[in-house]
Structure formats: C-alpha cells, structure tokens
C-alpha cells in the first residue's frame, strides 16, 4: 500500500498559508485516498525546537492535530497520527543520513540560508533540518508528501539521499518519493502553492512576519480577517488577471478564493478575468475567508485534547513498528547491525 505523509511544525499559531498550502490539501487527499493508501500525519516537534516556540509546545502539538480534525479529516484504520519525538528512529536515521548527505547540498538549502542569515551563531539544527525531514519521509517509504512550494527543495534532497543510499548499497532500501512535479499533480494542482503576504505580496505569508495585517492566523476573528483582506495590497493596473509575476497581490486573492471555496483555480480566474473593480474581488474573498474561519473555529471547539491523545497512542505504536523495521535495514546496510 502506498503512503502519503506530511507534517506541520507546532511552533506557534498557524497562518492561512499553512492551512491552504499544506493542511487542507492533506485533509482532502486523506479523505480521498485513505481506503487505499496509508495516510501519515505527524507533528515534527523536533523540527519545532530549531527556533523559538510561542506559548506551550505541548499545547501547540495537540492543537495542530485538532486543526486537521476541524478541517474535516476523517480517521480510519489507515490514518496514522503521531509525534516525531515519540518515534526515536527519526533521530537515528537522521544521523545515518548525515553521513550520506554532503555539506555542500545542505548548505544550498534556501530555507537554511534564509533562517541562518549567514550567522555563525545559528544553531546546527537549522542546518540539519532537511536531513531530519528526509528521515521523516524515508522511514515510512512515503511516495507522496503534500507540502507548500517552499518545501520542494527539501523533497528533492530526500529523493537524492534515497537514491544515493540505494546506489551505495546496491539495494532498494528506501522508496524514492515522487518528484515535486508529480507531487503537485497528485495534489490536483498545476503549480505548488505559495500564499503571499497580504501587504507585501512579493513574499510568502509567514508566521514570523511582524506586521499583523500581512497574515491571517487561524484564530483570527473572522471579521478581523475580512478586514485584512480588504486592506491587502493590489496594484494600479486596474484589470483583474492571474499573473503572479506582475500582479502578485490580485493573483494571491484569486488563489486564496479558489482554495477556500474548493473551486478549480481556472474557474475562479474565468469568473473574474477582465473585471476592473478590485474592491468587488476583495469583498468576495473577504466573505469566503471569513465564512471558512467561522466554520473552522466552530468545528474546532468540538474537538477535545483527549481525542487527539488517543490518536497519538495508536499512531505511535504503528509508527514505531514501521520506522524501526526500516531503520534496521539502514543499520544493516552500514554494518551497524
Ligand atoms: P512548516 O511548519 O514550516 O510549514 C508547514 C507547511 O505549511 C506550508 N506553508 C505554506 N504553504 C503555502 N503558502 C505559504 N505561505 C506557506 N507557509 C507555510 C509549508 O510548505 C509546509 O508544507 N519542514 C516542514 C515540516 C516537516 C515535514 C516533514 C513536512 C518536517 N518533516 C516531512 C513533510 C514531510 C515545514 O516546513 O513545516
């Protein structure tokens, strides 16, 4: 049985970018494929500690899974939910892969360059982050890894490490995850998703941006979120068109609306193309986002922590079993066992 796998760090409240770029696509794929594929959803808590955690990490971890459930995730016997640090094989395989990856390829990771800003005082975890991510994926032989566009480079790294490892030992120990172009197709998209900063649409929407109006958080009051959409930066071209290069603000709004309403982007574009009133587009997106948040927050209130803790208990038993078996193969290949 094939495996779909993804994780979202639990450092802080999530943004609409996390929700639309990773969480919601995973929920839709899980509900579509969980009869025929394994669906692994885990909280990369070890990845969370590479930077400051806002609030209580334990609370954030449970909340992340409550979010999946509030977004409509249906759990059956093929859906496995677990915490990374409760499956020690992740750290073990990370070490083994550290001895396969090169300094050069790890140094080329854009996220590492952005997060470290060239500081020598940056922690080694930031550097090693994509190698641990590769271990997260390879331990479970995951083929599909639904993620936002900013993580594509890390998928390519995981593919390269799997191929190099297999080649070195002349054995198909690791399943090579699908290419990013195939990942995008599997998600039913033509491009990776990158939700932009509302005020500065050249950049991606990010938790770490200081300005409140740049980002929508999942716990924002729906009316407040609507206001943020109404004050989003657009342009002075005066014609609605989907063109992320020349009109990133307007294109971002079209993309957000397509994802929030689960409508093909092409259909949303056809509805608006050639229109001139940006205010009308903003009104529509503001209302759709605010309805989505209202519904999401109401479902969230009905999901208890205990429900999540029960899922962790079952999922971690499964995850340890699968991960330990794959780890043993890697250990044997190197002569460690
Ligand atoms: P994290 O927590 O930084 O991001 C979680 C997910 O949210 C997506 N994302 C976005 N998508 C679209 N537009 C945005 N503005 C936006 N901002 C964030 C990210 O692409 C990501 O999919 N390294 C992963 C966590 C991880 C992981 C893994 C994922 C660790 N191990 C193994 C998959 C498989 C990350 O960046 O999380």
Image (cartoon, grey):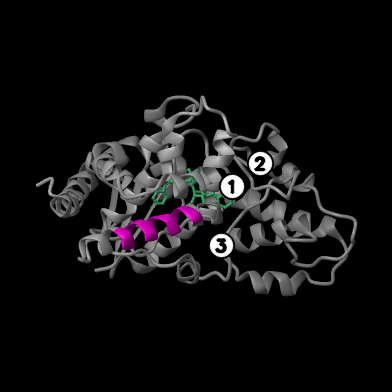
The residue to which callout 2 is attached is 215
Q: Position of residue 44 (x, y in %)?
A: 37, 41
With 175 as the anchor, is 243 left or right in this view?
right
Q: Residue at horizontal 55%, vertical 34%?
A: 116
Q: Position of residue 9 (x, y in %)?
A: 44, 40
Circle 1/circle 2 CB separation < 8 Å: yes
With 157 as the anchor, is 334 left or right in this view?
left
Q: Is mark 3 within 8 Å of ligand 1?
A: yes
Of the numbered discs 2 and 3, the one sitting upstream in the chain is 3
**Front-most of 213 and 107?**
107
Q: What distance separates the C-alpha of mark 1 from that of mark 2? A: 7 Å
Q: Position of residue 109 (x, y in %)?
A: 51, 48
The residue to which callout 1 is attached is 16
Badge 3 density bin: few <14, some 14–19, many ≥20, Cα 10 Å: many
Q: What distance separates the C-alpha of mark 3 from that of mark 1? A: 15 Å
The residue to which callout 3 is attached is 192
């Amino acid at each position: 049985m094939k495996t779909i796998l993804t994780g979202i760090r639990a450092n802080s409240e999530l943004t609409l970018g996390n929700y639309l770029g990773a969480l919601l696509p995973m929920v839709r794929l899980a509900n579509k494929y969980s009869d025929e594929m394994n669906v692994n959803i885990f909280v990369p808590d070890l990845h969370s500690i590479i930077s400051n955690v806002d609030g209580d990490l334990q609370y954030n971890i449970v909340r992340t899974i409550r979010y999946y459930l509030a977004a409509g995730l249906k759990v059956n016997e093929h859906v496995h939910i677990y915490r990374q640090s409760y499956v020690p094989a992740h750290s073990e395989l990370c070490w083994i892969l550290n001895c396969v990856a090169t300094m050069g390829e790890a140094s080329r990771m854009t996220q590492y360059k952005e997060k470290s800003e060239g500081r020598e005082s940056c922690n080694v975890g930031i550097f090693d982050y994509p190698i641990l991510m590769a271990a997260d994926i390879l331990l479970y032989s995951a083929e599909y890894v639904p993620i936002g566009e900013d993580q594509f480079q890390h998928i390519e790294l995981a593919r390269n490490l799997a191929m190099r490892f297999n080649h070195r030992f002349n054995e198909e120990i690791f399943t090579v995850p699908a290419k990013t172009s195939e990942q995008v197709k599997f998600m039913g998209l033509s491009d990776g998703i990158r939700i932009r900063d509302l005020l500065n649409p050249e950049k991606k929407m990010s938790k770490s941006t200081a300005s409140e109006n740049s980002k929508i958080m999942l716990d924002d009051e729906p009316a407040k979120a609507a206001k943020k959409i109404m004050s989003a930066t657009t342009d002075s071209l005066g014609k609605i068109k989907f063109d992320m290069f020349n009109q990133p603000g307007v294109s971002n709004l079209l993309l957000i609306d397509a994802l929030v309403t689960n409508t093909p982007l092409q259909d949303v574009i056809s509805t608006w193309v050639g229109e001139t009133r940006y205010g009308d587009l903003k009104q529509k997106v503001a209302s759709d986002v605010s309805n989505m948040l209202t519904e999401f927050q109401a479902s969230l209130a009905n999901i208890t922590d205990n429900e999540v803790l029960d899922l962790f208990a079952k999922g971690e038993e499964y995850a340890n079993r699968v991960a330990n078996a794959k780890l043993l193969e890697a250990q044997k290949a190197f002569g460690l066992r």
